[in-house]
Image (cartoon, helix red, strand yellow):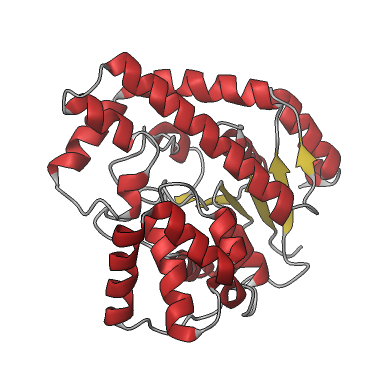
Amino acid sequence: MEPRIWLIAGPTASGKSALALRLAEATDAEVVNADSMQLYAGLRVLTAAPSPEEQARAPHHLFGTVDPADGWSVGRWLRAATDVLMEIRAQGRDAVVVGGTGLYFRALTQGLAEIPQVPAEVRAQAAADFDLMGESAFRGRLGAHDPAAAIRIAPGDRQRLCRAWEVYAATGVPLTDWQRTGDPALPAGAWRALALEPPREALYARCDARLEAMVREGAVDEVAALLARKLDADLPAMKAVGVREFAAFLRGETSLAEAVARAQMETRRYAKRQTTWMRGQMAGWPRLDAEAPEDQWRQFLALEPRLTGS
């Protein structure tokens, strides 16, 4: 039997990591990270990455392997993940790619074009325009040329807004159009996919509970260590949910309870954006809508009736 590749997507706190680990143990597979924040070292608790004990139960790849000072793009992740998947395949083992970053899955299954280098002066002008115009006006200008990017880029994400504009300014082609071209890293028929979408209220409750658990497990200490490095605020790792909120607490600008409440709110908003993206971009992927891990596993087995014969 040819080695199999499963893709498991889902919003934060949906249970996808637990499902991926259970599948990996059941099939002697290896787990590959597809979450843009779990890439970074030193943020395991804050990003809900697998614990050392969980990673010891099956081989894991691309979790906590990137220095926060080194901001990775989608293309860089794609190259690294493709190499890892080739190595796993060469060993005759199955792979489980799991995460909540939709663009990673789209790059794997639909391709990602090599975007031409943007001149430094164009990047500088985009940054200057953002500062002069403000986010709302800047987003509106981007929307006139790349409406899809203006819609999908989250509020406050200065880096991605500037990136989308500078690509258009330099090439005359919207970033969204560039991302629609290119050959997929995984050819059709080489992978099986599913997305977790538990009930919204249950998902939000899990988001809230997990934030409280993160504080008990050392998330604030992780943020303190990150801030001590005085990294560029535009780096991806500095935008992980919870960094800004706990940084305000560490500076004495708010109480811990207020910081937790704000981080919980941002986590719920992030989960909503992820779900919306999946509904639009992964509409054809089978859904698991159960909340409890055992129920999710049973739903998964119903999709994979041959799995028990692995």
Q: In the picture provided, is 129 more to the left or to the right than 265?
A: left
Q: In the picture provided, is 148 more to the left or to the right than 279?
A: left
Residue 22 can be seen in this image: yes
What is the x, y in percent for residue 75?
Answer: 47, 70
What is the x, y in percent for residue 229?
Answer: 14, 47
Residue 21 can be seen in this image: no
Write the residue at 84% across / 47% down. 306
Residue 209 against residue 304 in the figure, above or below: above
Write the residue at 46% across / 64% down. 77
Write the residue at 47% across / 68% down. 164
In depth, the one of 264 and 102 nearer the eye is 264
In depth, the one of 208 and 109 nearer the eye is 208
Task: State the image quarter where residue 211 is shown.
Answer: top left
Task: State the image quarter where residue 162 is shown.
Answer: bottom left
In depth, the one of 92 and 43 nearer the eye is 43
What is the x, y in percent for residue 93?
Answer: 61, 58
Write the residue at 14% across / 48% down. 230
Residue 49 against residue 179 in the figure, above or below: above
What is the x, y in percent for residue 103?
Answer: 57, 59
Q: Quadrant of the N terminus?
A: bottom right
In depth, the one of 204 and 125 nearer the eye is 125
